[in-house]
Amino acid sequence: MNLLEILNHDKKEMMPESYKTKTTEEMVQRVIEIKEKFGDKLFIPGHHYQKNEVIQFSDVTGDSLQLAQVAAQNKKAEYIVFCGVHFMAETADMLTTDQQVVILPDMRAGCSMADMADIDQTERAWVKLQELYGETILPLTYVNSTAAIKAFVGKYGGATVTSSNAEKMLKWAFAQKERILFLPDQHLGRNTAYDLGIPLDKMAIWNPITNELEYQGNFEDVIVILWKGHCSVHENFTVANIEQLREKDPDVKIIVHPECSREVVSLSDDAGSTKYIIDQINAAPAGSKWAIGTEMNLVNRLIGQHPDKQIVSLNPSMCPCLTMNRIDLPHLLWTLENLENGVVQNQITVPLDIQENAVLALNRMLENV
């Protein structure tokens, strides 16, 4: 389901306005009561980028794939209320049993990056790229993609990647084929390929809007084809942010997510996945100074958890991820009260024909990292 379909979703599955008038204390107490009532039958995974008002009720926090895997290991839970975004809930549905129900509290919680590569665009691109390069290309997709894109990649021999294992998976892919098509985040693909020693002038951009390969030079020189997609949050960290921070405080250490642009990553002191950033801050000495280039809810949480360190956002004007923030305390309570009344609202179900190839892509990654 793309973002437009989510926004146009059946209105009967939208939260009633009455939940917006409830007090925080009232909602917190009700969530506690319902969690206690359901016990092991209810499992709430919460992504690192969620608001604290939701994270406080998460049974586990983590990144998207980690949460899906933990959900799959939990055989006691009948209901998995996934506090993240749509593609994450899809992955959880694919990895859990048919008896387990995966629910997204707000169907508007999509991902703009994932929606930048829809299956129709990808299949059209594949036809043209096959005309250009024949059987020399292997597709890879970031786990931040729809189940349909994961299935496409699985069908053509490729695999999924995470920001933690992207380098290993690119090495694996190059052992299979001469070229890689990397979906949907151009920045993670470019940063990873560059770290592996692939020059920028060997990388091209696939534009899904014009259905054309953007490259100045001989197409035969292209090794990595980057889908023209990006994270709307991480693309807002800029070279100007770094220059201003360095001028203000040259002692601060800058750490960013590899979904940031190549220019930003190259000027930073360090770059890595969400888990890597958290681990680095946790291990940093008291008194150290950090500017973090990732989602604001997480940055604020790290600031609160580490009062002995000086932590700021790399971009002082940064807002939290808007779609991730669709999941809030009222939506969580609404979902749980529905379950209490025997109503499953906003269930995420991936069709079996898509599941088969998508799980194949996920398993190829898990087998090679």
Image (cartoon, helix red, strand yellow):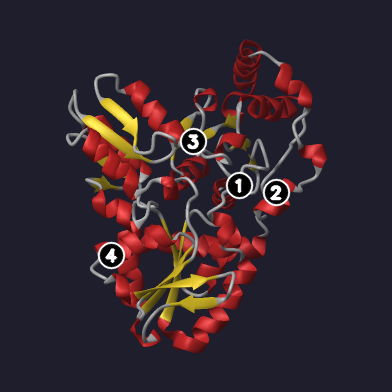
Which residue shows up at 57% across the image and 76% down it? 211
* Residue 127: image location, x then y, percent: 57, 82
Quadrant of the drawing holding the N terminus: bottom right
Q: Which of 35 and 169 is in front in this view?
A: 169
Three-letter code for the amino acid on which mark 1 is drawn: Gly
Q: Mark 2 points at which residue?
A: 6
Alpha-carbon span between mark 3 and mark 4: 29 Å
Q: In this view, does 129 lie above or below 348?
A: below
The answer to whether residue 253 shows anywhere in this view is no
Q: Nearer the viewer, residue 37 or 52?
A: 52
Which residue shows up at 24% across the image and 20% down it? 308
Three-letter code for the amino acid on which mark 3 is drawn: Cys
Q: Name the residue under label 3.
A: 319
Helix, strand or loop at label 1? It is loop
Which residue shows up at 30% across the image and 68% down it? 171
Q: Mark 4 points at which residue?
A: 194
Alpha-carbon span between mark 2 and mark 3: 22 Å
Q: In this view, does 159 lie to the left or right of 103?
A: left
Q: Which mark is residue 110?
A: 1
Helix, strand or loop at label 2? It is helix
Three-letter code for the amino acid on which mark 2 is drawn: Ile
* Residue 144: image location, x then y, percent: 50, 53
Q: Which of marks 3 and 4 is nearer the N terminus?
A: 4
The answer to whether residue 26 shows anywhere in this view is yes
Q: Nearer the viewer, mark 3 or mark 4?
A: 3
Which residue shows up at 33% across the image and 83% down it? 221
Helix, strand or loop at label 3? It is loop
